Amino acid sequence: MAHDAPQATGPSKLVIRNIGLLLSGALEKPILDADTIVAVNGKISAIGRLKDVDIEGATTVVNANGTTVAPGLIDSHVHPVAGDWTPRQNQISWIDSYLHGGVTTMISAGEVHMPGRPRDVVGLKAMAIFAQRAFWNLRPGGVKMHAGAPVIECEMVEDDFKELAAAGVKLLGEVGLGGVKDGPTARKMVGWARKYGIQSTIHTGGPSIPGSGLIGADVVLEADTDVVGHINGGHTALPDDEIRCICEGCKRGLELVHNGNERSALFTLRTAREMGDLHRVILGTDAPAGSGVQPLGILRMVSLLSSLGELPAEIAFCLATGNTARMRELDCGIIEVGRSADFVIMDMAQHSPGKNILHSVQLGDLPGIGMTIIDGIVRTQRSRNTPPAGRVPEIVSGH
Ligand SMILES: [Zn+2]
C-alpha cells in the first residue's frame, strides 16, 4: 500500500528530457514545441529545448525516450470516504489504482458513501471538515484528493456556509443527493456557498442509486451551481432537449462522467462544440459507484470523446487537464512555468494500429502509461493497469 507517499525532503530539481510529444493541457495551444521540462521544488521552472534550459544540479533526471508527456489527469468527480478504501464496492487501493491510470488530482463530489452518513446539520458539517482534513493529511500514492464536500440539507442557514468556509471547506457535494431537491432552496444555498468561496456541483439526471432522486434541467438551471455535475447522467441521463437547454441556458461547467450515459456524453460534447464552448467541458468518473471503480476511466473518456466524438486527441486531453484546472482553480493541469509538476508520461500501446499516440487514441485505443510524477516526484513507473507501451521513460539519475 502506498499510503506513505514520498514527500519532498529538501530542495529538488527534476529534469525530463528527450520528450517526443508535449501536450500542454491548454485548449488554445494543446501541443508545445519542447523536448525538456525542468521542475524545481515541485513547480515547473522551464519548458524548452535541452540546449536552452538550465539542467545543472538536477536531483532526478528522467529520459522520456521519445514518449509523450501530458499534465497529470484530473478526475472532476469522485466519491471518496476514508483513506484509500471505498465501502461502495468494498475495495481498497482504488485511488492508487487510478494513479496507475494517470490521475494525479481528484475532486470529491461528496463523501456520500460513508456508512451511516449523518444528515443533521452539525453532523454533516463535522463530516465535511473531517474529510477535508483527513485527505489533506494523507494522499494515497501522492494523489491530490480535494475532499470535504458536504451535501446540503434544507435546515442549513447562511452561517453554516460561513462556518464551513472558515474551517477550510471549499466544495459542496452534489446538490440533490440530500434533502434539497427544489430549485429555489438550492439556488439560495448555492449562492451562500459562492459568497464564502465554496464551489458547487449538482446531481443531474435520474437517480443513480436508491436514495438519490431526479434532477431535471429546470432545477439545474435555477440552482446555478458552478459545475453541472454529470450532465450525461449517473447513469440515467436527461432527454437530449433538456441537456441542450442546460448547455444553452448557462455558462457553467459541463461535466461528462464515465459512470454515465455515453451517448448523452457525445451529444453534450457536440452541443458544446457547436456553441464554441469546449472550454466548459470537463471529465470525471463519478466513482466509486454502482458500476465499480475505473482506474482507466478518465483515459477511457478521452478515448471515447476523441474516437466517437471525432475530437483531436490532443484536445480531448485538455478536457481532462487544463479545462478542469481552470474551472476548479487548481495550480496543476497545464504545462506552464509556475504550475505544479504533475505529469503523466505515456506512449502508444503495443500493437495499436495507430500511426502515433494521438492517432491511436483517435482510433479508440488507450495509451500505455510509463510513469506518473506529482510535485516533481516520480510516483509510479510502468502502469500495472494500462496496456504496455512500446517505449517507456526511465530514471537515469536520482531516485
Ligand atoms: Zn450524482
Image (spheres, helix red, strand yellow):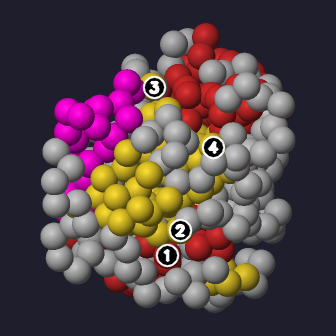
C-alpha span from label 3 to label 1 = 28 Å
Q: Secondary structure at mark 3?
A: loop
Whether the residue carrying mark 3 lies under 8 Å from ligand 1 is answered with no
Q: Are marks 2 and 1 in contact (CB under 8 Å)?
A: yes
Q: Earlier in the sequence, mark 2 or mark 1?
A: 1
Q: Earlier in the sequence, mark 4 or mark 1?
A: 1
**Callout in the foreground (3, 4):** 4
Q: Residues within 10 Å of mark 1 (few under 14, many from 20)?
A: many
Q: Are marks 4 and 2 in contact (CB under 8 Å)?
A: no
Q: Which residue is mark 1?
A: 141
Q: Which residue is mark 3?
A: 30
Q: Amino acid at mark 4?
A: Asp
Give above or below for 294 relative to 312: below
Q: Which residue is mark 2?
A: 380
Q: Residue 79, percent across and down?
A: 60, 67
Residue placed most toward the observer, 89 or 56: 56
C-alpha span from label 3 to label 4 = 17 Å
Q: Earlier in the sequence, mark 3 or mark 4?
A: 3
Q: Residue 156, percent across and down?
A: 40, 68
Q: Residue 313, percent across and down?
A: 62, 28
Q: Secondary structure at mark 4?
A: strand
Q: Which residue is mark 4?
A: 347
Image-based side of 364 in relation to 318, left or right: right
C-alpha span from label 4 to label 2 = 15 Å
Residue placed most toward the observer, 263 or 189: 263
Residue name at image x 20 percent, y 33 percent: 52
Q: Amino acid at mark 3?
A: Pro
Give above or below for 265 relative to 37: above
Q: Amino acid at mark 2?
A: Thr
Image-based side of 103 in relation to 271, left or right: left
